[in-house]
Image (cartoon, rainbow, N blue to C red):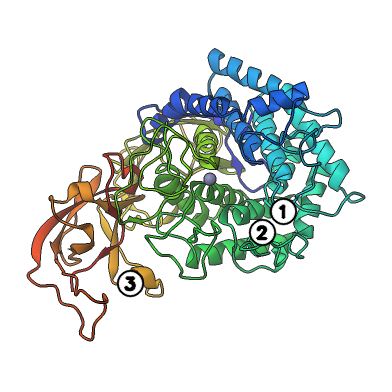
């Protein structure tokens, strides 16, 4: 029993989804409950209604035609839902969910060809031939998600039909694309990361070798370049081990990096591991938003250049946030470096938690940091636009909802890790962690409240290490053991080494005073502005919290005024500096000076729940008073 990402040999081991129970009243536990109770069924219902699941029935019945509902990658959404269901069933038994899962697996299995090939958009009468459009056909991408679903099923204790289906599909990929097969790659990476994980879970070294081949083949310009879609878009411009930064389509780049790092770890390829690590560092340092969001450009859903991080035109696809967590998790397991769970926390609270609505039935696809016009309420129909100011129940390209579902269902796995010395608590969520001889009860209302109590319920008999992550923003954190005086702990790791006894209790205080966060001056788009954060949360200003008639563009924040915590957000003083249009260009020969600025108290709320109160304009970076 384990969770996502289990390298054969790794400094740190993630915990299994069954080894962590998140408290349903906590920040993450409540989201996991909503995911289980609402999102899984929501996704299933939508894909049934749109005919994406019936595509498998049509293949089984031999009734395929080119007039097929869904994009060529719609199969992957069903596989991602299966993966989410598998993690959820591994977390806790649920007969209704188990029945839905098995019914879905039966329909998918019925569509698998004798040689293991499984796809509803290619390779059957009336459809394009197998692997006839590797750049955009997404066949291997789909198969990758099937493998990840199979891996989730096996790692939660079931070696059953989905595992067999996935194994046969992986066999077919190796047969077709192996060392003696066609030397091609898929336009959308995903098969690489999936094959390594399938190789680990199924005990098949040749799956790892196939992943290695795909990684080495990439970057040599073999995919046909299309109008508007360059080799860089596909990461086919430079071999992975020669690249210095992530570029092109963000989700593609991040999935590829995760797969490349997995290959590097399992083959002992230090050069490849170092290359991916350097790319991550450069990407985080220059191409990542305050929210942890990645990808600036809408046109190709891609990374921008260094410092190209506009707030209003931020794309920050939810899937890129999920993929960033996938990559950072792999880097952490190999190194134990605190920077990775720091970024995971930032991304979970400010991208992954932002996408789904409170009821788990609508989602953000793009996550801009500023919205200039209130979004229209999303209708009950399919949303054709990935962008917009309100969450939508479903999308024409609907990759994000199922990606959120599988991530939230497996969230417990990212909360802690074990190593030969003991246990590390990485994310602070109320609940119980059972791993490495430890049983820890974590009691906290973080991030609403600053106190995290970690009580030892059981511990290894000999001396061991309990390691707590002190987030990079937590300058004044303190720690106390069994009621002793609290001592300051610096950002990084707080290690406690002793023979733990039941009822030992560590109390961590993570100060949650709101703080100003200034952008690097090289990010032109937000120069002259400041953001406010509180603990792990990025805050934002929403128009619903402004007096009627006040426009969000006219608001300035006074960085010299006192920030105070307010509810789960903050309050700070500023001014409303009304300006008038000149009637000609919005530029002039004198620096504009606002006339008659009037004071205002600004109320800021967590970005993750923006647009929950109806259509609104919003901004994270607020101009400072001059
Ligand atoms: Zn997506």
Kindly report the distance in space between the C-alpha atoms of the residues bearing marks 2 and 1.
Answer: 8 Å
Residue 591 position, x and y percent, is: 21, 82
Q: Is residue 126 visible?
A: yes
* Residue under label 3: 527
Res 152 quadrant in image = top right
Q: Residue at x 64, y 41 (%)?
A: 5
Labelled pair 2, 1 in contact (Cβ < 8 Å): yes
In the current view of this chain or complex, which residue is farthest to the top?
95
- Asked if the beta carbon under badge 1 is closer than 8 A to the nearest atom of ligand 1, the reply is no
Kindly report the distance in space between the C-alpha atoms of the residues bearing marks 2 and 3.
Answer: 32 Å
Res 397 quadrant in image = top right
Residue 274 position, x and y percent, is: 66, 63
In the current view of this chain or complex, which residue is farthest to the bottom?
589
Report the disc number at residue 489.
none
* Residue under label 2: 234
Compare marks 2 and 1 and give the one earlier in the sequence: 1
Compare marks 1 and 3 and give the one earlier in the sequence: 1
Q: Is residue 479 left or right of residue 74?
A: left
* Residue under label 1: 135
**Viewer-proximal residue among 81 and 377:** 377
């Amino acid at each position: 029993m384990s969770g996502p990402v289990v390298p054969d040999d790794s400094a740190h081991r993630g915990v299994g989804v069954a080894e962590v129970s998140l408290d349903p009243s906590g920040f993450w536990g409540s989201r996991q409950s909503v995911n289980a109770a609402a999102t899984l069924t929501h996704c299933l219902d939508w894909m049934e209604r749109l005919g994406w699941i019936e595509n498998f029935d049509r293949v089984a019945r031999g009734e395929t035609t080119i007039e097929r509902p869904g994009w060529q990658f719609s199969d992957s959404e069903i596989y991602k839902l299966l993966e989410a269901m598998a993690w959820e069933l591994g977390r806790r038994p649920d007969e209704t969910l188990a029945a839905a899962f098995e019914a879905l697996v039966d329909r998918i299995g019925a569509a698998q060809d004798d040689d293991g090939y499984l796809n509803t958009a290619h390779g059957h009468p009336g459809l394009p031939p197998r692997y006839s459009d590797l750049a955009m056909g997404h066949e291997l991408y789909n198969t990758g998600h099937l493998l990840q679903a199979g891996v989730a099923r096996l790692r939660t204790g079931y070696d059953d039909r989905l595992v067999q289906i996935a194994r046969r599909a992986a066999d077919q990929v190796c047969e077709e694309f192996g060392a003696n097969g066609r030397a091609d790659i898929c336009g959308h990476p995903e098969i690489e990361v999936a094959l390594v994980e399938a190789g680990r879970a199924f005990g098949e070294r040749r799956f790892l070798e196939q992943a290695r081949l795909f990684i080495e083949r990439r970057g040599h310009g073999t995919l046909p370049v299309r109008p508007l879609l360059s080799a860089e878009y596909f990461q086919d411009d430079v071999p992975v081990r020669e690249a210095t930064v992530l570029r092109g389509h963000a989700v593609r780049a991040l999935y590829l990096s995760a797969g490349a790092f997995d290959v590097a770890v399992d083959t002992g390829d230090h050069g490849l591991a170092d290359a991916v690590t350097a790319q991550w560092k450069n990407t985080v340092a220059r191409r990542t938003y305050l929210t942890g969001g990645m990808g600036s450009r809408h046109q190709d859903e891609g990374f921008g250049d260094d410092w190209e991080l506009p707030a209003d035109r931020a794309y920050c696809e939810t899937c890129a946030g999920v993929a960033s967590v996938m990559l950072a998790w792999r880097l952490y397991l190999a190194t134990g470096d605190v920077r990775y769970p720091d970024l995971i926390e930032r991304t979970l609270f400010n991208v992954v938690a932002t996408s789904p609505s409170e009821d788990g039935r609508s989602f953000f696809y793009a996550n801009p940091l500023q919205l200039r016009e209130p979004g229209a309420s999303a209708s009950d129909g399919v949303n054709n636009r990935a962008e917009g100011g309100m969450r939508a129940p479903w999308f024409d390209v609907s990759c994000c909802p199922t990606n959120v579902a599988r991530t939230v269902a497996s969230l417990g796995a990212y909360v802690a890790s074990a190593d030969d010395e003991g246990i590390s608590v990485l994310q602070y969520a109320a609940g119980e962690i059972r791993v490495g001889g430890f049983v820890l009860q974590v009691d906290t209302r973080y991030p609403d409240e600053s106190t995290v109590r970690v009580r030892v319920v059981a511990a290894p008999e000999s001396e061991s290490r309990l390691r707590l992550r002190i987030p990079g923003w937590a300058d004044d954190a303190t720690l106390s053991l069994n009621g002793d005086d609290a001592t300051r702990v610096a950002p990084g790791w707080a290690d406690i080494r002793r023979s733990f006894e039941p009822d030992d209790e560590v109390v961590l205080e993570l100060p949650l005073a709101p703080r100003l966060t200034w952008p690097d001056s090289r990010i032109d788009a937000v120069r002259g502005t400041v953001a406010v954060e509180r603990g792990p949360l990025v805050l934002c200003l929403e128009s619903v919290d402004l007096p009627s008639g006040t426009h969000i563009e006219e608001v300035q924040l006074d960085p010299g005024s006192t920030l105070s915590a307010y509810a789960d957000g903050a309050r700070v003083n500023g001014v409303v500096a009304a300006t008038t249009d000149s009637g000609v260009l919005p530029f002039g020969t004198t620096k504009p000076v606002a006339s008659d600025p009037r004071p205002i108290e600004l109320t800021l709320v967590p970005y993750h729940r923006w647009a929950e109160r109806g259509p609104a304009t919003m901004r994270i970076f607020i101009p400072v008073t001059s």
